[in-house]
Image (cartoon, rainbow, N blue to C red):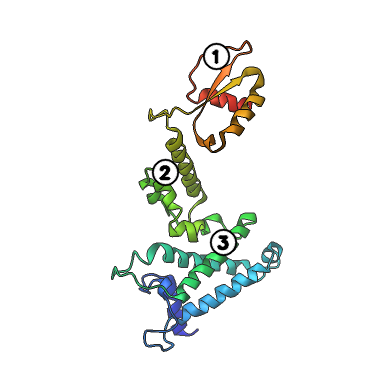
């Protein structure tokens, strides 16, 4: 009920009410008196206690006995921490009108760290048994524009180092995370093997397989590839009479070999 604490909490959550980035928050002002963000200090203590309590609370206690908090209060905590983390990783430096990089503070960094830990714990539990509707975790369109701007494998993998993916990946929808994973795998395969659509297929490694010894020959060749397993593998089938079958492997023969194997 303290107006100062309530005001400080709003400053932490709402970027329009508090200009200072969360990572720079302190419980002391520049003169050393206790007139800093008291609300952030109390929030840090609450989230830290919640984190330690969740460590000794199993899913049955959380869902059926509603410990340490009733589920409607847990959902409110999820909404609160989601806003806090979204501001910390996406909004703070963007809305910094001075464009000056401010030094981080232990209080702000600890608040971000423990909030991420609690949200990861709750998200893992919600994945096993729902605590709330899935859309409650998600910030709409997060990373969508970043994925669209990516062109190469390096661009896609660089997104994994972004603050969103490192600190709070649960804010991104599962479909968008799956899309990013597929793009990383696809672009890496194209870099290593080339692409028939782009007419830059690389020569690859020739593997000769007898029709009657697909399993034996396949295991022998694959075990000898080692680190070259990621390279394009071109299959040349040998008939039962020992002659090489005609055909150029642009993916179809390897698919047939992999299916038979």
Indicate the position of residue 155 as horizontal and vertical percent values. 39, 47
Mark 1 and mark 3: Cα distance apart in space: 55 Å
Residue at image mark 3: 120
Q: Quadrant of residue 73?
A: bottom right
In the rendered view, tell whether residue 177 sits above or below residue 37.
above
Between residues 163 and 59, which one lies in front from this camera angle?
A: 163
Q: Is residue 140 visible?
A: yes
Q: Quadrant of residue 152?
A: top left
Marked residue nearer the N-terminal end (1 or 3): 3
Residue lying farthest to the front in this orientation: 224
The nearer-to-camera label among 3 and 2 is: 2
Mark 2 and mark 1: Cα distance apart in space: 36 Å
Indicate the position of residue 182 as horizontal and vertical percent values. 49, 42
Query: Which SS class for mark 1?
Result: loop
Query: Which SS class for mark 2?
Result: helix
Residue at position x 52%, y 59% from top?
136
On residue 245, the disc is 1
Are discs 2 and 1 less than 8 Å apart at CB?
no
Marked residue nearer the N-terminal end (3 or 2): 3
Q: Is residue 171 visible?
A: no
Indicate the position of residue 208 as horizontal and vertical percent values. 57, 22
Residue at image mark 2: 153
Marked residue nearer the N-terminal end (2 or 1): 2
Are discs 3 and 2 less than 8 Å apart at CB?
no
Indicate the position of residue 257 as horizontal and vertical percent values. 59, 25
On residue 12, the disc is none
In the rendered view, tell whether residue 27 sits above or below residue 71.
below
Residue at position x 44%, y 60% from top?
163
Mark 3 and mark 2: Cα distance apart in space: 27 Å
Residue lying farthest to the left in this orientation: 98
The nearer-to-camera label among 2 and 1 is: 1
């Amino acid at each position: 009920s303290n107006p100062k604490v309530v005001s400080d909490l709003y400053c932490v959550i709402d970027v329009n009410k508090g200009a200072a980035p969360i990572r720079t928050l302190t419980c002391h002002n520049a003169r050393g008196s206790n007139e800093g963000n008291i609300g952030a200090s109390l929030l840090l203590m609450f989230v830290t206690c919640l984190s330690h309590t969740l460590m000794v609370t199993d899913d049955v206690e959380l869902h059926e006995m509603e410990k340490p908090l009733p589920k409607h209060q847990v959902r409110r905590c999820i909404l609160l921490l989601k806003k806090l983390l979204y501001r910390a990783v996406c909004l703070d430096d963007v809305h910094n009108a001075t464009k000056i990089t401010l030094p981080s503070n232990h209080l702000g960094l600890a608040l971000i760290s423990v909030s991420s830990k609690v949200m990861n714990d709750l998200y893992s539990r919600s994945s096993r048994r729902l605590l709330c509707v899935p859309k409650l975790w998600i910030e709409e369109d997060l990373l969508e524009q970043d994925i669209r701007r990516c062109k190469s494998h390096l661009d896609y993998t660089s997104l994994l180092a972004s603050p969103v993916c490192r600190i709070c990946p649960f804010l991104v929808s599962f479909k968008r995370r799956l899309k990013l994973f597929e793009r990383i795998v696809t672009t890496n395969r194209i870099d290593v093997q080339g692409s028939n659509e782009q007419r830059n297929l690389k020569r690859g490694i020739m593997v000769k397989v007898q029709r009657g010894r697909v399993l034996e020959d396949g295991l022998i060749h694959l075990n000898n590839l080692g680190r070259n397993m990621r390279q394009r593998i071109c299959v040349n089938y040998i008939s039962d009479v020992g002659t090489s079958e005609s055909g150029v492997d642009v993916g179809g023969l390897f698919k047939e070999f992999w299916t038979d194997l």
